[in-house]
Image (tube, helix red, strand yellow):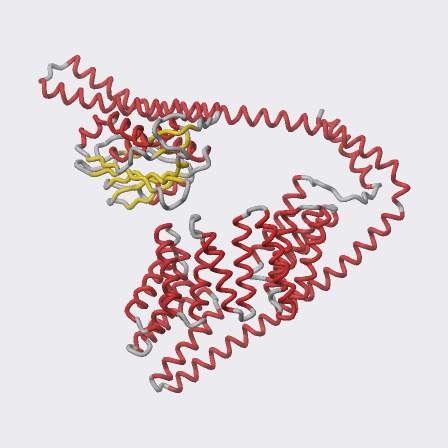
Amino acid sequence: MLRQLRFICLLMLVALSSCAQKYDQTSISEADSTTLKLYDQKALFYKQKDADSALSNADKGLKLARKLRYPPAEALMLSRLAEINGLNGNTTTATKYQQQALKIYQTLKDSTKITKATSDLGFIEGRTKEHLSEALDLLQAALNQYQYRKDSTGIANTYKRLGEVSEFNQKHKKALLYYQKAEELDKNTRATDEYYDLVGHIGQLQAKTGAPATAVAWLEKGIEKSMQSGHSKAMINLLNHAGGLLDTLGDKKKALQYHNQALQNAKLLGIPEEQARSLIGIARVLKTENAGQSIIHLKNALSISRSIGHIRLTAEIYHSLAEVYKQQQRYDQAISALEEHHHLLDSLLESDKNTKIKVLRKDYELAESRVHIENLELANIRSSYERNVSIVIALALLIILTLLTWYYFRIRKLNHALHESNQIKDRLFTIIGHDLRNPIGSITNLLGLMEEDELTPDEQRAMISEMRKQGNTSLEILNSLLSWGTAQLNGIEIKQENFRADEIINKNIAALHGQINDKHVIIEHDIHPSLGVCGDADHFDFIVRNLVSNAIKFSYPRGKIKISADTSSHPGQIIFSVSDTGKGISPAQQQQFKAENMSISFGTGGEKGTGIGLMLSKEFQKAAGHEIWLYSEEGKGTTFYFDVNSDQKPSSATQL
């Protein structure tokens, strides 16, 4: 069978090599697709670091796409070349490439890509004042299309681009208006680095338009949201911007506080460039009051910038040093620092010049390559009539090969399904062997002791209590295993209905009464009886029971557990939380939870946890299009959050 397949493939290659297909392909092989993706990924990786390498990879991708006659990839690579040229200031060349990409998407009638390419072209042309009017028209056309499709993400991104183009052309008030429209669309979504960048733009523009206090308020809004969402990297930039503005407003104490906080975050995340920028901010605040300390911070920043080879940052630090030396009337050192500053700027200018030359050279080579390819295409068209017979043969062989390929992939799919089934079986047996064996074995041992030895009533009660705990552990593991195994084998089915959250929560608190009394923990909840949820009641019940049981397990005796519901942060959604003041979860286990894997752990009373319930809860949430996440500090406790849809009708009953 394999030999016959190879023979047919060989005939196919011979037939195809003798014919020139004039028509564009709609699909390509997996190997060619992988190669094109690799070229694109390399171009993206190098675009900020090495323009020559970025252009080289995009150029190779474009040539391959044209060789394969695959227009979607050709348009993508043209857009990538436009992006790289735009970053290096070659706006004319960038515009040419983007126009070619837009033309291909229009030929393909891909409305989504047409809108994006139109937006990209407007953004590129907006970098030149002579094409500002055309750029704004293109961006407005893209905005109209996004609004017609009710694509909120596209609308917000286009407003950002309109803001950036207006800001680049010194139209600060108009830019501020566009940025605020984008922020209005993004403010209720989960915070991202793009959101913090947008808030940073608004803050900087407020400062430029003479409203530094308003600018600080915007930046502090972003800082507050980043603290709530845990985006520490984005927080660093906002903290440093806010510190700089507060310094200009004369609030040096708070400015130092923000810069120091940014420095600590940068150290924690291991970002040396941001550490250096935070030190520069601290030095500027201290410049007039403590010049000696200012110089120490600048020298520390200088050491960091040199270690990472950041020439532009190093030049900035030398300029700041010169200002402090001049203030101290140490003119020789000030001149020396300024000379080093100018030397570094000259080297950067030369580097930028060389980069632009390389980019232009690559563009010229690409143009020559395009002419050569077009000549070859003309030669192929002339001989196309002689190859019609070969095309017919090739198509017949292609049909045969397609049938064989379909048969091959069908067998491989069945083998893959069988392999996954075996993996589920192996995992179930592993958990049964390791996690169920121990508690059941403990029960057996205790029963043996009770049978062989004469025990006092107190000893008997202690052993019975221990057996109950081990039995509860076994039952909990078994229930989780059965639910998880069923979900893995049969898939997760969502049964949408409206129900009252407080009834399920109260039912689970009552069911866990024994565990609660064993540890004397206090459970509070502020769930109003009128709070309705739209979702799968069984899944909600499982998640609540698992989270509350875990909270009890990892709480210290006489600890406190609170169940809450947030109905105001996201309209149409409810965010439930279960928090405890127990032992907390280590950073390593938190990473395991994010990676959908949990190791065995023990509660404050020796209770065993396998993590299966948490993993199944996560799968339930994922299947319903929702999330479950946590915040924890070791020794201080843990809070688990999960979101659900709110009931669209009054929740007087638990079911529709």
Residue 241 vertical position relative to residue 38 in the rendered view, above or below: below
The x and y percentages for residue 345 are 52, 75
Q: Quadrant of the C terminus?
A: top left
- Please tell me how many numbered marks the rendered image carries: 0
Is residue 300 toward the left or the right of residue 160 in the image? left
User: Residue 395: in sight, yes or no?
Assistant: yes
The x and y percentages for residue 285 are 33, 73
The x and y percentages for residue 502 are 30, 31
**Which residue sits furthest top?**
451
Residue 244 vertical position relative to residue 188 in the rendered view, above or below: below
The x and y percentages for residue 38 are 61, 48
Q: Nearer the viewer, residue 501 or 440?
A: 501
Quadrant hosting residue 584: top left
Is residue 354 toward the left or the right of residue 562 in the image? right
Residue at image point 55% right, 46% down: 150
Q: Quadrant of the N terminus?
A: top right
Q: Nearer the viewer, residue 39 or 99?
A: 99
User: Residue 52: in sight, yes or no?
Assistant: no
